[in-house]
Image (cartoon, rainbow, N blue to C red):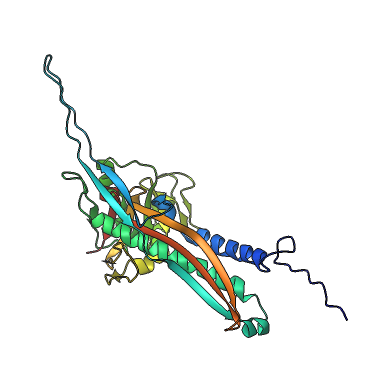
Amino acid sequence: MANATVSRLGQVNSSGDANALFLKVWSGEVLATFQRENKMLGMSSVRTISSGKSAQFPVVGTNSTSYHTPGNEITGTAVKHAEKIINIDDLLISNAFIANIDEAKNHYDVRSIYTSEMGRALANKVDQHLLQLSVLAAQASATITGGDGGTQITDADAKTNAASLISSIFECAQALDEHDIPSEERFCVVPPATYYLLVQNDKILNRDFGAERNGVYAEGTVIKVAGINIVKANTAVTAFTDQSSSISGTNNTYNVDAQNVAAVVFHKSAIGTVKLMDLAMESEYDIRRQGTLMVGKMALGHGILRPESAALIKTA
């Protein structure tokens, strides 16, 4: 009796890796989940490098003006310079091992669930680090001597009183204006409890106080306050706690005690991200262990670029 001719669904043109097409489907699931869950990466300045352990961001101070006296030589004015260096952290991974026998016995597609969770875990960790970094940026001093540092607004009722929080957001907007920060691409990130506190405030949703579609009470949404985009982030629940312990595997500073922070307000230029390896996926069947190891990975790092572009609202 002859052997059957098997149509390998995972092969490209019936040749090569029998799992090639399956891997692409799985990769797409992780990528889609990461993009859907990640909020902070698009709110930072991102640079991609092809090799190396860090990237340099030059910082240039402001120039000055003066009135010229006829006949006097114009010799130029000194412009101050500095730099910010962002290092690449160790490889950030999320992984899972599925035993062959368990997958065979299972009655649902566990790989799809696992890959979604892997993408979500990577997105949450990136968001958490960037949120903690935005707090550090608001606490940081000026990069250029004589320049502006971050802004900290103390509002004891910020976590419980929407009107008080709104007033503090306006103070943050004023601080950014006074630091000559562009009005576009400003964000205010808050945890869900604070976000829904804002939604219930009449001034935000009342068309007499703003745009007709600045939010919908029935849908539980709010878009802007003081021209600043309001962003709800569940990772803020974790980031806005005492995260002062050092984090193994990081080559940048993310640890900060943020338990009193109610919200962070920042421009995209406040924090930066350097990517060495973008999100990638690998899987391999281990015949010795009779199962498949799936790994989602990325190599990147984050750092403060412009402290004057960041502000925070704290209760104490």
Number of numbered discs: 0
Q: Nearer the viewer, residue 40 or 45?
A: 45
Do we see residue 91 in this rendering? yes
Query: Residue at the spot x=83%, y=75% of the render?
Result: 4
Q: Is residue 91 left or right of residue 155?
A: right
Reply above or below: 105 against 79: below
Query: Residue at the spot x=49%, y=47% of the render?
Result: 213
Quarter of the image where the N terminus is located: bottom right
Quarter of the image where the C terminus is located: bottom left
Reply above or below: 2 against 7: below
Q: Position of residue 200 (x, y in %)?
A: 42, 59
- Residue furthest toward the right? 1
Q: Position of residue 196 (x, y in %)?
A: 42, 62
Q: Position of residue 138 (x, y in %)?
A: 26, 55
Q: Is residue 312 left or right of residue 46?
A: left
Task: Tell me where residue 191 sits by quadrant.
Answer: bottom left
Q: Nearer the viewer, residue 211 or 235?
A: 235
